[in-house]
Amino acid sequence: MKLVLKNTEAFVNDKFNISCREEPCLDASWHYHKQYELIYTSKSYGIRFVGDSVAQFFPGDLVLVGAFLPHLWRNDPSYYKEDSEKNVKTVVLKFTLDFLGEGTFENPAFSTIKNLLKESTFGLCFGKEVSKSLHNELIELVDLNPADKLINTLSLLSKLSGTEDKVLLSSTDMRQYATEPSLRIDAVIKYISDNYSGPISLDDVAGIACMTTNSFCRFFKKMTNKSFTEFLNEVRIRNASRLLLQEDYTMSEVCYKAGYNSITNFYRQFKKIMGTTPKDYRQRI
């Protein structure tokens, strides 16, 4: 999948922009940009990639992505079918560090917000209770007048900076500053996210990237901080966890729908990534 330095000149305001999106997926490419990005998913589900983090997202998902941190939201493949009637609603807030003026967050009064933005270098996912309490503010933010949008955004950041109910997403600092895009990673990540339920070999993805398998393995590790096998297993297990929560499937059906031919391997990978067995995960949730 192409890693893109995103051109934001088309935004109404390069320093501050709020939109409500109702189409599947947010972007076609794994990308990064100079703006911070607060993403609230009101409707839809799928997988998000933030730095080296691969995780499911559901309605109520609230994430703050730091500047220059690669990321991508991909809806479940069922959203892209021509006859799909599934609804999508996502509020996207983009802003630069100086959207309120140069040096605003150097003011001691905004020290907690400054720390929040520093933490977002790795991506931050906020807890369900936090997103639930801010739901109305986030939804209404889109329709406010320009002045109130700025004021309410500052208020939102202040509230988010005061909560401990948040987790870091990426395990390492994966910020990108290069202006040359990588065309290869774009196609590979899209292929994996769209075809995880079927057989995917190293030769398949190396061919998509037009590389030898050895070169591809080094390239993929450098771009994602994970091996190809680790990345594929995370995508499959995150999708399996969704099936366990939302659908009335047997364990064998979940195993095969997630792309595994061996129930033993499925259980082993699930325990490794989720820290529990599929059965215990379903019962606990």
Image (cartoon, rainbow, N blue to C red):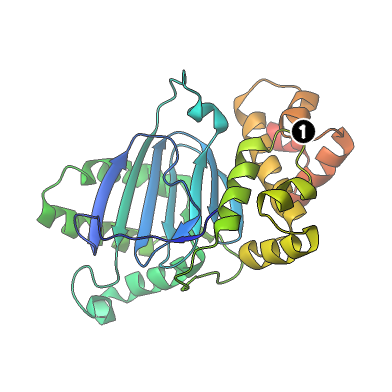
Q: Residue furthest front?
A: 210
Tell me the element at label 1: helix
Quarter of the image for the C terminus: give it. Answer: top right
Horizontal and vertical percent for residue 225? 66, 65
Q: Is residue 165 visible?
A: no
Horizontal and vertical percent for residue 283? 70, 32
Establish if 202 lies above or below 251: below
Location of mark 1 (residue): 279
Horizontal side of residue 175 vs 158, given as left or right: right
Label count reads 1
Horizontal side of residue 112 vs 166, given as left or right: left
Establish if 153 lies above or below 105: above
Q: Nearer the viewer, residue 142 or 74?
A: 74
Q: Amino acid at mark 1?
A: Lys
Residue displayed at 49% across by 63% down: 181
Horizontal and vertical percent for residue 269? 80, 46
Residue displayed at 37% across by 58% down: 37
Residue displayed at 66% across by 45% down: 235
Horizontal side of residue 112 vs 2, given as left or right: left
Establish if 246 lies above or below 183: above
